[in-house]
């Protein structure tokens, strides 16, 4: 039986490797009818609203994970018997939840849990609250951290005795644009934005370096100044200088590394620059419409103590340095950043 299942996956993969953009159900029906075996659970949609508050040590209200699934087999869904949903917990560090890695049966769906969808195939919606998942796994909610994840695995059972799960599918079926039938899902727990990081912060930059092969020459001095982070929306900030003085120190009249095209996004333990700083043909910071080239940035938080945060920064050209950013008013940075220490 295992060999038969792999034959079906192989045939479907070959067809959709040639015609991956097709949305014609007749192709799937024809293959399943000719081979006489096989089935898929297509992902119609998934919604991950698992949001954890690291300050309160608990999930935010209404945190849940939802899947809408469609079953298809050689008999247009008539072979469907049941679907088992398994779950386990995956922490970013295994010490916190040694028992969380044990997979357990969360729910068994029967035919009655499905209804006929728009394509006349069985469709079901499964949704699990954070409370349900925590209680089922028996884990301590206060030890959860953002960027941990739940891992779901589905097992599809047919009335003819065939059983399908994640180990029975290949790339075109599990991740293809048409099927999207992986039988497994890994929703990452997001972090709640607990406060605003906006403010006028002071900085000390060391080890400033210019991009190799260019005309930049850095002074070698410790660079000091202020950087203004302005909140654009919750968790997203415009910066008055992405390079913390490095541009102005290493390049004549270039200006600060800033502009409307780049922001800093707070993502759990990270501060992620998104977008680009634009440079014109004379090597000066400019707007997008006048740019000759664009530079993305990378920030890596290496240490946080109280109001002081140390960041290594660089851009796509090779400019970079290390900066100590002291928060406005001496206020402590959010505790979650200390996980970088």
Image (cartoon, rainbow, N blue to C red):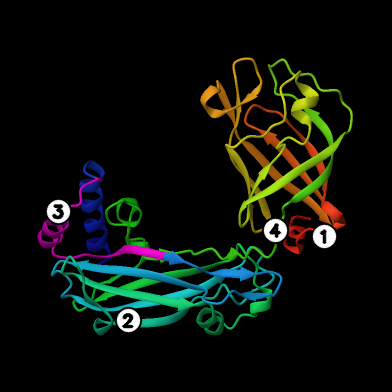
Badge 2 marks a residue whose secondary structure is: strand
Question: Which of the labelled discs sits on residue 332, or is there none?
Answer: 1
Q: Nearer the viewer, mark 4 or mark 3?
A: 4
Residue 25 location, x and y as percent? Answer: 16, 57
| 246 to 176, vertically: above or below | above
**Marks 4/3: CA–CA distance:** 52 Å
Residue 29, image quadrant: bottom left
- Residue visible at 61% across and 80% down in the picture: 139
Q: Which residue is mark 2?
A: 109
Q: Which residue is mark 3?
A: 27
Residue 173 on image: x %, y % = 30, 55
Labels 4 and 3 touching (C-beta < 8 A): no
Q: Is residue 63 left or right of residue 206?
A: left
- The answer to whether mark 2 and mark 3 are in CB contact below 8 A is no
Q: Residue at x 24, y 82 (%)?
A: 111
Per the image, label 4 sits on a secondary structure element best described as loop
Residues shaded magenta? 20-46
The residue that label 4 is drawn on is 196
| Image position of 133 with respect to 281: above or below | below
């Amino acid at each position: 039986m295992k060999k038969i299942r792999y034959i079906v996956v192989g045939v479907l993969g070959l067809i959709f490797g040639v015609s991956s953009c097709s949305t014609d159900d007749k192709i799937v029906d024809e293959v399943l009818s000719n081979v006489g075996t096989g089935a898929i659970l297509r992902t119609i949609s998934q919604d991950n609203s698992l949001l954890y508050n690291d300050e309160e040590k608990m999930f935010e209200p209404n945190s849940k994970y939802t899947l809408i699934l469609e079953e298809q087999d050689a008999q247009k869904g008539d072979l469907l018997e049941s679907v088992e949903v398994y779950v386990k917990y995956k922490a970013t560090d295994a010490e916190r939840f040694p028992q969380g890695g044990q997979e357990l049966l969360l729910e068994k769906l029967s035919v009655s849990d499905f209804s006929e969808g728009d394509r006349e195939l069985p469709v079901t919606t499964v949704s699990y609250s954070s409370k349900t998942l925590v209680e089922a796994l028996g884990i301590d909610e206060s030890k959860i951290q953002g960027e941990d994840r739940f891992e779901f695995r589905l097992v599809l059972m047919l009335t003819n005795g065939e059983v399908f799960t994640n180990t029975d599918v290949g790339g075109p079926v599990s991740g293809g644009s048409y099927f999207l039938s992986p039988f497994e899902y890994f929703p990452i727990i997001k972090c709640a934005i607990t406060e605003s990081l906006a403010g006028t912060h002071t900085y000390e930059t060391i080890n400033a370096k210019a991009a190799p092969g260019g005309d930049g020459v850095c002074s070698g001095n410790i660079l000091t100044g202020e950087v203004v982070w302005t909140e654009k929306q919750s968790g997203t900030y415009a910066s008055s200088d992405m390079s913390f003085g490095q541009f102005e120190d290493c390049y004549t009249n270039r200006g600060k590394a800033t502009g409307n095209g780049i922001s800093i996004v707070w993502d759990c333990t990270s501060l992620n620059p998104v977008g680009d700083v634009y440079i014109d043909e004379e090597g000066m910071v400019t707007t997008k419409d006048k740019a000759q080239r664009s530079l993305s940035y990378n920030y890596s938080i290496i240490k946080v103590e109280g109001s002081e945060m140390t960041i290594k920064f660089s851009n796509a050209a090779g400019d970079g340095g290390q900066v100590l950013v002291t928060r406005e008013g001496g206020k402590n940075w959010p505790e979650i950043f200390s996980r970088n220490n």
